[in-house]
Amino acid sequence: MNLDARGLTFKYFENARQPVIEDFSISIESGKITLLVGKSGCGKSTLGYILAGLYPENCGYLTEGGVYFGGVNLSTFTPDKRAACVSMMFQNPDLQFCMNHLENELHFCLENIGVPEPERPPRIKTAVNTLGISHLLLRSFNSLSGGEKQKCALCCILVIGAKCIILDEAFANIDKESAREIIGHIKTLGFTVLAIDHNVALWEGNVDRTVSMDGTYPKTFDFRPTLHDTGAEVLSVRNLQVNGIRYPDMVFPKGSITAIVGKSGSGKTTFFRTIIKQCKYQGEIHFFGRELSRWRSKHVFAKCGIVFQNPSNQFLALNAFDEVLFSVNRWHTGKDKATKEKKTMELLSVFDLERYKKYSPYLLSQGQQRRLAVLTMIAGEQELLLLDEPTYGQDYENIVAIMELLLEKARQGLTVIFATHNETLADLCAHQTIRIGD
Amino acid sequence: MSDFLFRINPFYKFTFLVVFATVITFIHSFWMNVWVFGACIFLLLTGTRPAQHIKALKILIPVTVFAVSLFFSGLFFGGGATGPFGGISTASTQSGMNMATRFYSFVGIGLLISLTTDPYALVKSLRTHAKLPRKFAYGMLAAIHLLPHMKTEYQNARLAFRVRGVPVGPLSLKPIFAMLVNAFRWSEMLSIAMISRGFYE
């Protein structure tokens, strides 16, 4: 059965002047995979939530239009009946489960749709066997990788018997192999799918139709910057082993850009945490001419900045302007207030964030938060910058803007190391690509 | 034998210990406190595995610090005493001993429940036997599921602040604020994920 949205107009606040979605219609054909694209912040995720029936029931106002599943208005369904028609896979695999392991979660799903207890075990067995994940049934969710968690999420949808799945950047922070395996399962099982994804390449060969929400389509990644020459070594790693993970020997010259690639859980984040002295290690790390263990943490932080995978826990101020100003104040103590404020506005304009200057950093989208976090670090004068997935959740223009800024800073002497799942980006924009976890 | 406490129906165990703790609240007896605590420790030693013994020991270290402070509070200010240098008597010593052992007895009961009960099994049992509404049962489980994330997120927030040159002490509020803001977002995302899987009251 088709899932149709007709003439949707949606606002988050009743008195908002501008709706997030205005008079938008889409038809998702039964048994087909439809890819939804558009610029970052154009309302794709919001549309996904409306199509899954989660909005406006839980947030916002649908002032016009409606969503129809097989011709029946979705708002007339109770959540259990609706779940059996449309379900959703979310961005963050950690925040999809309320139980401790998959078996309990599947019981929870079946209880929701009113399946009696004796009928549940065979249904659970069929679902896990279909996806080949029976070994995950009793493993704690905390011990699973991102890819395994998303397979569990798909298993929940399968056990409920939903016909249609909305995927909201569901593969943004898992490795390509796991994502492709899940896409393969979705295709084989014949689900009706609406996939919201910036990474179009991931869906190549599996998509039946691509729809743009704002008329823009993703370009093939062809940003090919001219890479400059690099300087002397600032950081080097030999025979490094952290928490049982063995790393290859690495050398990072001054002004270089290095991409770290590898599967989810291969140790990219652990490597960054080791560099900022948060993990015990065996082997040698030469950090600006001295062994890392001989540096005090606060001196390491003066030399090295980091943008975390979840940028929202590194904000200090109540609005985006103050957030950047805080870093500017810290690093440019001698300058007057007007100069610092001018510098702050210049930095915000680099990523088109000046119109959000009065917004709380927590109210910005994931992509905007990440760009703001990059700015707070770029504003400083650290000599080494570590970025964990800086381009996650960004559209093409913003990926290019972030990489251009990093390249400009690298030309001025900043050494950049970034972790990414986007190997094309790594190949085109980095002086060297290091694969870990092989 | 070594895990018989785990096999008792969680609802019966929980109800019995809560009722028992409520009853002893009204009885002021040093020897009863000692017996209750002794019995709890005996049951923990015989009815749980070594991993639980170590957990219990780790909890009992700060508990002992509190118990000693309670003892001295009673000694110096209970039973007619007026401070460290005046009026310490048999009555004030007894008051101190009562307060300290009372604290131990409640901790013992708490340890018996927390170290021998799987929260998921307890909530399931409460649903079956006490007809606990689904909203509360699964709400509690979702909150339990979020706890390890909150701990990690708090540590990450502290680290992020230090990276930005903001000194954070053990009692700094800023990382707690960052963690709480995230916790609100998570609870919202988790509840939406639950609804998308058909959960409703």
Image (cartoon, rainbow, N blue to C red):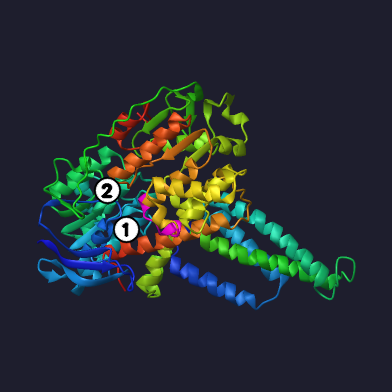
The quarter of the picture where the N terminus of chain A appears is bottom left
Whole-percent x and y of residue A192?
14, 55
Whole-percent x and y of residue A8?
19, 67
Q: Does the magenta stretch include residue A331?
A: no
Residue nearest the viewer, comparing B97 with A34: A34
Decide which of tag 1 and tag 2 comes sooner along the chain.
1
Residue nearest the viewer, comparing A247 with B124: A247
What residue does disc 2 label? A151
Q: Which residue is the extreme one toward the right?
A: B86
Q: What residue type is labelled 2?
A: Lys
Q: Residues within 10 Å of mark 1 (few under 14, many from 20)?
A: many
Residue nearest the viewer, comparing A152 with A179: A179
Residue A231 visible in the picture: yes
Chain at tag 2: A
Q: Name above or below for residue A335 compared with residue B121.
A: above
Tell me where the magenta segment starts and ends, as one range: A358-367
Q: Name above or below for residue A71 compared with residue A232.
A: below
